[in-house]
Image (cartoon, helix red, strand yellow):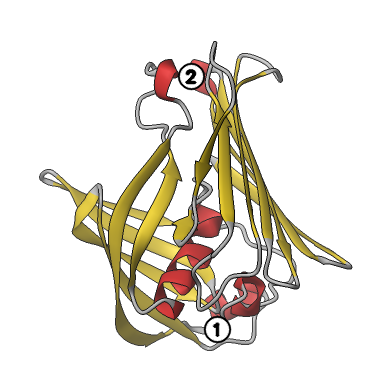
């Protein structure tokens, strides 16, 4: 389960999101500050069975140009290892949680539909020696057009947009492609194929006001 909150401050917005897996006492926390100037600061924590983080990662970048951060740094600390730095210049950063899918897709769109994506590694909870290591891959984005959102979608997210935008996202672990639906820069649902199975995820329980795609700095 993932929950998220959006807060506005004088310098921009702050989004925090938490993914919890009670069966293994796992909690992943992400907090990202998006500045009006276009800069971004992020903090990720991996916690097991308590509040003390087992792994930590930070990200910072200055205002980007056409969706590509020109001065970005990713730092991560795995269990039992000192902190390491990784230059993320010209890369798009995805802070793991679904709420940030809009930021990633609109950034790729602004960059022409192609780019290098940096994702903190969390593929196997048992691989603690790799937690939050930078996993970089080339991704592609194709705009598939607009669809009617319907009144229920518009009212539930508190935005003025009356349409959904559909994208095909491919590359990396999504080589077969996945499809995403955004409403004014906010992820509504997505689907992808893994092996012989097709997975569909729909976000729900929205409340409050959404500032629109402008929050990501590319609108």
SS at badge 1 = helix
Label 2: element kind = helix
Q: Are marks 1 and 2 in contact (CB under 8 Å)?
A: no
Q: Is residue 160 above or below residue 20?
A: below
- As rendered, which of 173 and 81 lies closer to the eye? 81
Q: Nearer the viewer, residue 21 or 91?
A: 91
Q: Quadrant of residue 122?
A: top left
How would you rate the neighbour count of disc 1 (Cα within 10 Å): few for under 14, some for 14-19, many for 20 or more?
few
Task: Classify the position of the C terminus by image quarter.
Answer: bottom right
Residue visible at 58% across and 48% down in the picture? 73
Outermost right residue: 10
Q: Kindly report the distance in space between the C-alpha atoms of the residues bearing marks 1 and 2.
A: 37 Å
Q: Is residue 188 above or below residue 196?
A: below
Disc on res. 23 = 2
Q: Is residue 178 above or below residue 214?
A: above
Between 203 and 97, the one lying in front of the other is 97
Please provide percent x and percent y for residue 187.
49, 65
Task: Please name the residue shown 43% across and 68% down the image.
Answer: 105
What residue is disc 1 on?
151
- Residue 198 visible to the viewer: no
- Residue 19: quarter of image: top right
């Amino acid at each position: 389960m993932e929950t998220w909150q959006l807060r506005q401050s004088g310098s921009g917005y702050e989004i925090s999101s938490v993914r919890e897996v009670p069966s293994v006492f796992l909690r992943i926390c992400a907090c990202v500050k998006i500045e009006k100037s276009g800069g971004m600061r992020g903090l990720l924590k991996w916690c097991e069975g308590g509040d003390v983080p087992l792994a930590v990662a930070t990200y910072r970048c200055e205002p980007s140009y056409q969706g590509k951060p020109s001065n970005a740094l990713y730092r991560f600390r795995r269990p039992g290892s000192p902190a390491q730095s990784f230059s993320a210049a010209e890369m798009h950063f995805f802070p793991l949680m679904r709420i940030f899918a809009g930021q990633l897709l609109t950034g790729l769109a602004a960059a022409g539909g192609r780019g290098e994506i940096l994702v903190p590694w969390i593929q196997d909870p048992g691989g603690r020696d790799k937690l939050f290591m930078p996993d970089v891959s080339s991704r592609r984005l194709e705009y598939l057009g607009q669809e009617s959102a319907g009144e229920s979608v518009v009212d539930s997210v508190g935005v003025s947009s009356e349409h959904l935008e559909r994208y095909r996202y491919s590359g990396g672990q999504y080589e077969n492609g996945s499809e995403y639906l955004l409403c004014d820069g906010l992820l509504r649902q997505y689907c992808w194929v893994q092996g012989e199975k097709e997975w569909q995820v729909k976000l729900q329980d929205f409340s409050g006001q959404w500032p629109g795609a402008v929050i990501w700095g590319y609108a």
